[in-house]
Image: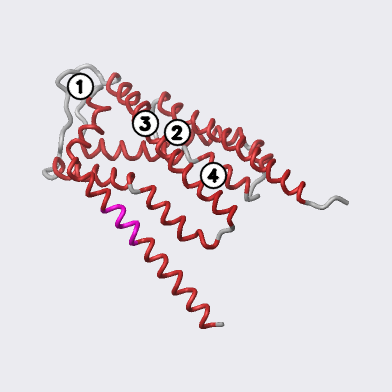
């Protein structure tokens, strides 16, 4: 018995090692595709700021290595994003043997939905929220002040905003998961709606600049996504209960 347990443990360890190797390979392949286009990617990601600067406006580098390292960092971040589907797939393959067939389907749908929502959140931040933020900030600059953002600070700001929105857009999956697994009842989640709205605005105040527009642009989608999660959870639980009820023998 003890020998069998050791064998199972080693088997899980080897499987985890294999999945980690495939994750690293996926990242390296993605990095090999993005590195040759590091400068083009840099130009693409700084466009939201440059498009809002007045004529002749430009970005600055305050360190010697920044012009070289920042494009490489952007290429790395894009490679991580491109390899994310492979990363999640490898993690799913690792836990798949311990799942029932229906749980495998649900978890696979959850992984795919998570990727879609992450991309949607990051795209919403990049194409809609960030230009609005920069337009507001640059338009609020006092007369005689030239707005010239340091490229390293800009990259950190860009990553934090896109991550905040990408993670916030996972709200429906989180709501569905905790409701479907019975951690919290849907009724309780609905009754907590007012607290969620307050929390959404608090999160918006923490992860966005101190202007009301960007706070609303994070808080309102977060609240709507929470409502979407409640709707999906209610439908799934209703279908599950209906299926269980029909499977019970009649008395």
Tag in front: 2 or 4: 4
The residue beneath circle 3 is 209
Of the residues under marks 1 and 4, which one precedes in the sequence? 1
- Tag in front: 1 or 3: 3
Q: Is residue 143 left or right of residue 205?
A: left
Question: Mark 3 packing: few (<14 Cα in 10 Å), some, or many (20+)?
Answer: some
**Which mark sits nearer the N-terminus, 2 or 1?**
1
The quarter of the picture where the N terminus appears is bottom right
Disc 1 element: loop
Residue receiving disc 2: 204
Q: Residue at x 73, y 49 (%)?
A: 244
**Residue contact at pointers 3 and 4, CB within 8 angstroms:** no
Spot occupied by residue 45 in the image (x, y as percentages of width and height): 26, 33
Mark 2 neighbour density, 10 Å: few (under 14) some (14–19) many (20 or more):
many
Tell me: residue 238, above or below residue 4: above
Whether the magenta-drawn stretch holds residue 24 is answered as: yes
Q: Please provide the residue range marked out in magenta.
A: 21-28
């Amino acid at each position: 018995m003890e020998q069998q347990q050791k064998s199972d443990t080693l088997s899980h360890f080897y499987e985890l090692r294999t999945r980690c190797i495939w994750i690293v390979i996926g990242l390296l392949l993605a990095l090999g595709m993005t590195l040759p286009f590091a400068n083009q990617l840099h130009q693409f990601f700084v466009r939201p700021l440059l498009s809002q600067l007045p004529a002749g406006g430009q970005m600055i580098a305050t360190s010697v290595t920044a012009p070289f390292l920042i494009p490489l960092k952007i290429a790395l971040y894009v490679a991580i994003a491109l390899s994310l589907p492979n990363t999640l797939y490898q993690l799913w393959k690792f836990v798949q043997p311990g799942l029932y067939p229906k749980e495998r389907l649900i978890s696979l749908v959850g992984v795919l939905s998570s990727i879609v929502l992450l991309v949607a959140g990051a795209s919403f931040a990049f194409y809609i929220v960030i230009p609005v933020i920069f337009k507001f900030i640059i338009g609020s600059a006092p007369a005689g002040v030239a707005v010239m953002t340091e490229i390293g600070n800009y990259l950190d700001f860009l990553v934090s905003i896109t991550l905040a929105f990408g993670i916030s857009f996972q709200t429906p999956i989180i709501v569905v998961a905790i409701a479907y697994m019975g951690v919290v009842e849907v009724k309780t989640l609905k009754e907590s709606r007012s607290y969620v709205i307050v929390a959404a605005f608090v999160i918006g105040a923490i992860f966005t600049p101190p202007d009301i527009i960007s706070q609303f642009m994070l808080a309102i989608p977060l609240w709507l996504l929470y409502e979407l999660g409640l709707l999906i959870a209610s439908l799934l639980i209703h279908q599950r209960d209906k299926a269980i009820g029909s499977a019970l023998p009649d008395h």
